[in-house]
Each structure stands twice: as structure tokens, then as C-alpha cells.
Amino acid sequence: MDVIAAGIVRDTYVAPAIADPQQAARDALARVLSGRIARGARVAITAGSRGIANGPTLLRGLAAAVRDAGGEPFFVPAMGSHGGGTADGQLAMLMSLGITPETVGAPIVSAMDVVDVGVTPAGVPVYCDARAARADAIVIANRIKPHTHFAGTIESGMLKMSAIGLGKAVGAATYHAAFTSHGYEQTIREVAAVMFARLPVVAGVGFVDDHRGSTHAVEAFAADEIVAGEERLLVEARAFLSVLPFDELDLLVVDEMGKELSGAGMDTNVTARSMDGRTQKVARPLIRQLFVRDLTMESHGNANGVGIADFCSRRLADKIDWQATYLNAMTSAAPAGARLPVVCANDREAVNYALTAAGVERLADARVARIKNTLHIDAMVVSAAALATLRNAERYVVAGDSDALTFGPGDDFAGFPPVA
């Protein structure tokens, strides 16, 4: 198998983006903080492990708003067990996202010890990062988006950040264990409610990214408005959920996976596969075989979610930090996410194996799509057979031929075309 005829498919949908995200964040939080903190108050702001459009810039705006109100801002890593479950690992993860004291304009204080906050009505213990708990005020900041494991009226956002993020490794493990008995949404809501009632949470800030990696919305809420605000912003965020415009593919090739791209490494809302890699999370597309080619540097070896794939490259497998990966998989009570797929020497071998497993007899009939990652699919490379099944043709356009499904030196694919 040498050449798969392919074209570049581009998403033509464009949504308005915020021209100055830093100022938007500063203005939004300033309106909420007015009169809510004392001069000289030490204010903890959360910083998570997900890649957020304009992340450092937005956080810098929040720090400026705290200073405008007379407070002294500092950031705490709020990412559960990510970064290998260590203070230095979490600092390194923030640094790989461009989040440093210099870029956000305030100190970052990282440690893993927690304090007991209380117990939920269901009997789940609640924990909080000790530095945040000792602050005079807390600002919960996070991107609002659909979750990779569950669907509800709140998913990934400010409430999850206040629970799993600020709960550090011990809290994340406790809450994920509780999900089995009490469900994701109930547990997150109840943990967040205890946090808001017992700790000095003064505000929440929600960011909504569009599907092109720009900031679409920034809104700040007083503590008693966070839940309703997040519910509304989640509806808005769903409109930007990247989807593949096909009902069925024989093979999906994902160039890179990583924790900063998705909690599952590859967003299950895009792959349509649950974390077990075997069952459907959403109805379509049905992806018969999935090949992931690389692990991002920003993931720091954490390949949790690689089990979603059927095949992976040797270069990806060699980058895996199994200790970090297993810690994340077991903390989230999803060991299947850490299963190693079939490891292939090169792209040619992976494609041969995958199309054979998909039952494809003729290369011309192979329905194949290649994407850079599951966070950015506004451009994709699609085989001729898949192009014939393209849905929503009024939104997606074919923007010329591509050699990105042909094999070059080393039997690997040619480079991915730049996003227009």
C-alpha cells in the first residue's frame, strides 16, 4: 500500500472571537471582585493542566483584576494527580503550557498536601489544596467544555476544577471512586457545594474556546452564581464541539495525543469511543480502527487514553512514562485507558494492519481520515472513499488534493498540511 488518494477538508464555520482576552478576563473578574475582598487579601487562583486558548494571557488578566481590587494574587496548580502526582511535576506541566510566574504576573505555589473540608451528603470526604484553603479568597477559573467520560448539565468546568482540581491527587482518587456509586455529576456538584460553603470562594471564571483555538467567551460569577453560569456556558460550549463529519470510517489517524489536549488524551467526543476503546460514547462516527502516531511533549509522558486506540507508533510507545500513566488511569478508575495498543514500527505498517483489521480489501475503498489532534479538527486529510461520504457539505469544503496519506522516507506519512 503506497498511495491513498486524498483531499484536504476544511471547516468553514467561523465564530466571533474576543480581540483582547487579557483585558476581557481582567474586566470580567473586576466586576465581580468589587467589594468582595479586603485590601491586602491573599487570593488563590486555580491553574489547570488543560490547554486553554490564550491560557497564560487570560490568567494574567485575572491576576491584574485581583490587584485592581487591592488583593495579592497567587496561582495554585489545580489538576488532581496530573504531572505525575508531584509538586514539581505539576509546575512542569504548567510551564509546558506557557504558564510561569513571569507570563501570568503572579507567583505559582505548588505542593500536594490537602486539608479536610467536610463531607458531602452522600458521605464523600472533601479535600482542598492546603495553600488555597489558607488564602483569604479563592477564584476558580477553568475552561467550560463537554467532558470525555460523562454527559450532564455540568461537565468539565468550574465545579470540576473546585472538586478534582483543588482536591489534588487524594481528592481526585476519592471522587473518582465515588463516581461508581453516586455518579459523576452528583459527586462533582456535592463536592463543589461543600467547597463553596466552607471555603472563601469569592468568584468563578469560565472560559469558552471556539473550535479554532480562539477565546469565544469569558465570564465571571459570584460564588452563588457559579452553578447557573456554568450550566449556561456549557450549552454555549457544545456548539463548538469538534466533530468528524462522517457516519463511519475504516481508519482514523490521529497525529498526536496529550493531556493538555484532552483529559482522555484524545477527546472521546471526537473519536466517539468510550475510554475502554471498545464501546461507543456517542452514536457516530463508527471508527473501525484508530491509529495514534505521537505523544505531545506537554503531556510529560502521561499517555492515559492511549487505550482508546487500536494501534500506536513505536515513537509514541517509547515516550510513555508508565508510572505517570498508571497513576492517572488508576486515579480516574479507568485502567483500560492505559492499555498499550499494537505497537507499529512505522505508519505504513500501522495502516496495513489497520485496514486489514477493518476488512478493507481494496485501497481505493478505504475510508480514512487523518487529523492533527482531537482539539483542532478544522482541517483534516480525507481519502477519496471517505470524501464520498462527507456529511454537512455546506459547512465543510474540499480545499485541494493532499499527499498527507502517502508514505515518505522511513515509511511514514508526509507532513500534515498547515491550517488555513
Image (cartoon, rainbow, N blue to C red):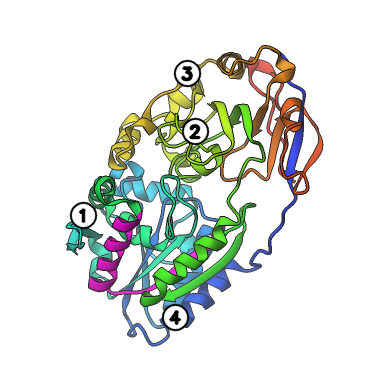
Is any atom of residue 314 visible in this view?
yes
Give the number of the disc on residue 343: 3
Evaluate if marks 3 and 4 touch, with contact meaning CB atoms under 8 Å apart: no
Residue 175: x and y, percent?
A: 26, 51
Mark 2 crowdedness (10 Å alpha carbons): few <14, some 14-19, many ≥20: many
Of labels 1 and 4, the one closer to you: 4
In whole angstroms, how far apart are the C-alphas of marks 3 and 4? 51 Å
Mark whose residue sits in front, 2 or 4: 4
Q: Earlier in the sequence, mark 1 or mark 4?
A: 4
Q: Amino acid at mark 4?
A: Val
| Tag of residue 113 | 1
User: On the rendered image, what quadrant is the N terminus found in?
Assistant: top right
Q: Is residue 3 visible?
A: no
Question: Which amino acid, by three-letter code, is at mark 1?
Answer: Asp
- Which mark lies nearer to you, 1 or 3? 3
Q: Are marks 1 and 3 in contact (CB under 8 Å)?
A: no
Q: Residue at x 34, y 52 (%)?
A: 184
Pointer 3 local density, CA inside 10 Å: few below 14, some 14–19, many at least 20? some
Q: Which circle marks residue 32 in the picture? A: 4
Residues under labels 2 and 3: Cα distance?
Answer: 13 Å
Q: Is residue 165 above or below residue 233?
A: above
User: Relative to residue 359, is residue 282 depicted above or below?
Assistant: below
Residue 223 vs 299, above or below: the answer is below
Q: Mark 2 falls on what kind of element?
A: loop
Provide the residue designation for mark 2: 295
- Residue drawn 44% across the image and 75% down it: 221
Q: Earlier in the sequence, mark 1 or mark 3?
A: 1
Ranked by sequence position, the earlier of labels 2 and 1 is: 1
Residue 160 located left or right of residue 316: left
The range drawn in magenta is 185-208
Q: Amino acid at mark 2?
A: Leu
Work out whether residue 157 or residue 384 is closer to the camera in this orientation and state it. 384
